[in-house]
Amino acid sequence: MVVVAVAVIAEATATVVVLVVVVVKVEEVVIVVVVVIVVVVIVAVIVVVVVVVVVSSSSSSDIGRSRGSGSGSGSKLSVQTGNQPKIAELSDLKELKSADV
């Protein structure tokens, strides 16, 4: 997932550079419009990537555990995100038990 996110962000950045270089030759007014549009697109891509990573880590916490046995900072990050949903699930279960009583 992280590799996909990095690739998408790098691709978006390269597209921005190409658009700015092409538009610089046209007019200054067009540059402002293109830069604003590109910034909005980049922010949207980053938000989508973050949402996908959060949803995937919350839905599959077992994957985070299996990666935690490996070495490197990437495995530590996946373990941390894998543990957070479990805490929320435990509190939800306590609320459900108290509601049933």
Image (cartoon, grey):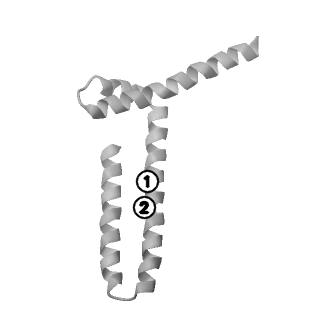
Considering the numbered disc 1 on the image, is that residue within a helix, a strand or a loop? helix
Mark 2 and mark 1 in contact (Cβ < 8 Å)? Answer: yes
Q: Residue 42 bears which disc, if any?
A: 2
Q: Quadrant of residue 32?
A: bottom left
Q: Nearer the viewer, residue 84 or 4?
A: 84
Q: Which residue is mark 1?
A: 46
29 sits left or right of 76 in the view: right
Question: Where residue 53 appears, x then y in whole percent?
Answer: 43, 42
Q: Disc 1 residue type?
A: Ile
Identified at 31% across, 28% down, the residue is 67
Question: Where residue 48 appears, x then y in whole percent?
Answer: 47, 52
User: Please, which residue is most extreme toward the left here?
Assistant: 71
Identified at 33% across, 63% down, the residue is 13
Considering the numbered disc 2 on the image, is that residue within a helix, a strand or a loop? helix
Identified at 34% across, 76% down, the residue is 20
Q: Quadrant of the C terminus?
A: top right
Q: Residue 86 bears which disc, if any?
A: none
Q: Disc 2 residue type?
A: Ile
User: Please, which residue is most extreme toward the front here?
Assistant: 28
Question: Where residue 61 appears, x then y in whole percent?
Answer: 44, 28
- On screen, residue 98 above or below 13: above
Question: Where residue 54 appears, x then y in whole percent?
Answer: 47, 39
The Cα atoms of the two marked residues, 1 and 2, are separated by 6 Å
78 sits left or right of 100 in the view: left
Q: Quadrant of the N terminus?
A: top left
Q: Callout 2: 10 Å neighbours few (<14), some, many (20+)?
A: some
Q: Quadrant of residue 34?
A: bottom left
